[in-house]
Amino acid sequence: MADLRIDKLIAAGSTRIELRTPFKNVQLYATPYKDIVTGEYKGISNHDELEIKKSKVPFATPEDTFLLTHGTVLETSNPRHMQILGWLLETPEIALSEEDVMNRTSLAKFYIYDPDREARVKVARIQLKLKAQNLVSEDTETGLSYRLRVLENPMEGATRTRMQAAMFQEVEKNPSRIIELYNEEKFDLFVLLYRALDRGIIEYKAPIYSYGTKFLGNSKEIVVEFLSSPLNKNVLELIKKQLEDESIELDETNTEGLTDGGDGKDLVTSGLIPSSLM
């Protein structure tokens, strides 16, 4: 994969391979990577003594060391640089992109800078943010109010302009999450959850959400996933029926069989909530 990235850069006319790091004041003395299974050094070819004597450029060896700092450049026209690059790309300290470096499980400290890829990523981020901003701009006052509740930023009673301003701030933080909130099916379930909470049909006793004695989840997102499952359609229909008719009271006959074939649990029998609290 790394070799393909280099090939693409060279094919595009790049004469310099630049290595960058997103971290401040980081430098690395890189050495060839030894495969713990085979015991071989990756990216280094074996050469006999005759080849070594005839070569004008020193071959890469396990003892090679190369200092990396932000902006280190390797010239594609320099045979020695290309040798170094051959084993450098096999080390776990080098990634293909900045996103790979920032991955929490990554050991990489440096990445290959690809200006075209960086431009594509930047354009994609801008487009994502614009999409989220457009959704917020076209939203209704009620929609903004409920979505802000989902984001743990309730603003009931605020003007539409103030709610939009708050949503635009959320777009700056995480446009993908805002776009997800405009997923019609899931948002409708969030609205249903809040209406049921406001009416006392669904109860919340930190951190448990419950319907009667039935466990729904320990976060709003989990409750929405529970209600969206076809296996729990009967639970959803009962809640909807109660919201439509205020005269319907919740009792054991209404909640019987809520988890038949579903993934809910009885709070009392499972021990999640003492019977004295129910």
Image: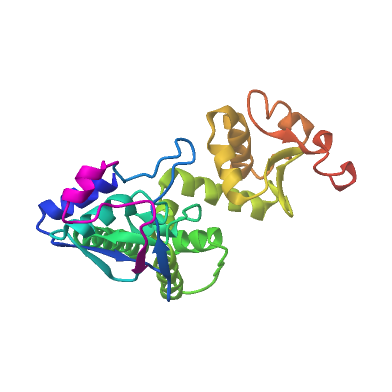
Q: Position of residue 205 (x, y in %)?
A: 75, 53
Q: Position of residue 167 (x, y in %)?
A: 43, 67
Q: Is residue 192 visible?
A: yes
Q: Is residue 135 visible?
A: no
Q: Look at the picture and state if 266 lies above or below 11.
A: above
Coloring scheme used: rainbow
Residue that sits furthest to the right in the current view: 276
Q: Quadrant of the N terminus?
A: top left
Q: Residue at left 17%, top 51%?
A: 55
Q: Quadrant of residue 113?
A: bottom left
- Nearest to the observer: residue 122 or residue 60: 60
Q: Is residue 82 left or right of residue 27?
A: left
Q: What secondary structure is the stretch in magenta mostly built from? A: loop
Q: Quadrant of residue 226?
A: top right
Q: Does residue 50 belong to the magenta stretch? A: yes
Q: Quadrant of the C terminus?
A: top right
Q: Is residue 126 left or right of residue 57?
A: right
Q: Does residue 169 belong to the magenta stretch? A: no
- Nearest to the observer: residue 253 or residue 74: 74
Q: Which residues are magenta?
A: 46-68
Q: Position of residue 77 (x, y in %)?
A: 12, 59
Q: Look at the picture and state if 239 lies above or below 132.
A: above
Q: Quadrant of residue 81?
A: bottom left
- Nearest to the observer: residue 41 or residue 127: 41
Q: Residue at left 82%, top 44%?
A: 273
Q: Position of residue 169 (x, y in %)?
A: 43, 71
Q: Residue at left 86%, top 48%?
A: 277
The mark total stands at: 0
